[in-house]
Image (cartoon, grey):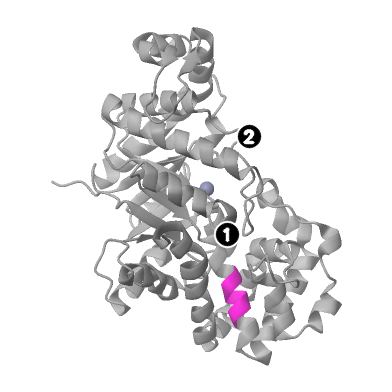
Amino acid sequence: MSNLVLEKYSIGVGDRFAHQAKAQLAACLRAAERGVAVVPVWNKSNREHKIVGSEPSSVRAAADRAVRELAWKRPYHVDADHINLGTVERFLEPSDFFTLDVAETIGRAPEAGTAEEFVGRHPELVGRIVIAGIPEPFQVSREQALGAAYKYLRAVREAGEIYRHIAGRKGAGTFITEVSMDETDSPQTPPELLLILAAIADEKIPIQTIAPKFTGRFNKGVDYVGNVEQFEKEFSEDLAVIAHAVPHYGLPQNLKLSVHSGSDKFSIYAAIRRSVRRFNAGVHVKTAGTTWLEELIGLAEAGPQGLALAKEVYARAYEHLDELCAPYAAVIDIDPRRLPAPEEVSRWTAEQYTGAVRHDQKNPLFNPSVRQLLHVGYKVAAGMGERYTGMLEACESDIARNVTTNLWERHLEPLFVRA
Ligand SMILES: [Zn+2]
């Protein structure tokens, strides 16, 4: 039996209401026309499903339909994003990609003696570590290696448990496994990443993508905030560590980095593109969150009814600011003083609305606080039920144009295609 293997370049797409799969796939077709294969992976986290009240099977249905309608011949996948043992059940059938989220277990002490035993078994993780592509060797003391083992071993063991549970139900080799450690406090250092990969190999998890936490802020729906040079250095060091670990530990050849909250991080796309090419590496970039904002932009452009609904979403989101922001507190930076009152927004033209929301940092109307509030405001639209989804259907062409353009021009082209 041949294993399911994720292609070199892949893009995490998806949308809150399962209406934009075709428009997203159209962006991958544009990349294909330019000779670059970027495989779509539709993902939706358990958190999103809970907020919207949707089922993972709807993601599979939307993906299959889009692939059929556009006659997409390359692979595509459906990602059970950020699942754990408690939440994986309803994702098992429709998904063929699983993002095992063990960030919460990072820092919990492993069983007595296991860290010591692990470091004893891995003398290569202590002392002077030379990694091709990183000029300066790392110097790791036994205490530092033990500290990292204490911090990460239990999380990796848990990933192993989740992996084996899924493999027991679906069959090994029939799905792609990602391990995510991004929703945690501090970025992993290269020696820590190496230790994590050694532990993952010990657990026999056939990991194809890993999502570490990177330096800087990856706020939802807006640009990267941080030191781009430092990011590029760390990102390429992570690539070097992966290239080193794959043959050392017998990990899958195609193991690559996964960038979460990867949409709209325009200022680091050149750094990602350069680093990935330098190492001849692959990369997975999750961008699902950006599409819902294009729905609002498309609605606003489609005519008075669409614009009115888009304004209503803002007004409700404004009223429920605290409640909507709470689940995303760590990944948004909204300045409440920059949020216009709903009465003011109600007088906006379509151009003012789209100017505030569309991610064009050169436009003086662009308002990142409005954009982020709307980003987390999809619960409002979910509450509107068919009134919202019906309008999506009525305004389909305006929305699809914006969804495809955003994904192609602002994401796929600079990440994968640009010279
Ligand atoms: Zn994530």
* Three-letter amino acid code at the position of disc 1: Asp
Q: Marks 1 and 2, how far apart in space? A: 21 Å
Q: Is residue 113 shown in magenta?
A: no
Report crowding for label 1: few under 14, some 14 to 19, many 20 or more residues within 10 A (C-alpha). many
Residue at the (43%, 70%) spot, across then down: 24
Instruction: Between residue 166 and residue 22, name the one nearer to us.
Output: 22
Magenta-highlighted stretch: main secondary structure? helix
User: In which quarter of the view is residue 374 placed?
Assistant: bottom right
Residue at the (57%, 33%) spot, across then down: 187
Report crowding for label 2: few under 14, some 14 to 19, many 20 or more residues within 10 A (C-alpha). few
Query: Residue 80 vs residue 1: left or right?
Result: right
* Disc 1 target residue: 264
Residue at the (54%, 29%) spot, across then down: 106
User: In which quarter of the view is residue 220 placed?
Assistant: bottom right
Query: Residue 186 vs residue 15: left or right?
Result: right
Magenta span: 293-298
* Three-letter amino acid code at the position of disc 2: Asp
Q: Where is residue 13 in the image (x, y as percent from the top left)?
A: 45, 62
* Disc 2 target residue: 185
Question: As displayed, is residue 144 above or below residue 197?
Answer: above
Instruction: Between residue 397 and residue 137, name the one nearer to us.
Output: 137
- Looking at the rendered image, the quarter that the C terminus falls into is bottom left
Question: As displayed, is residue 210 above or below residue 404?
Answer: above
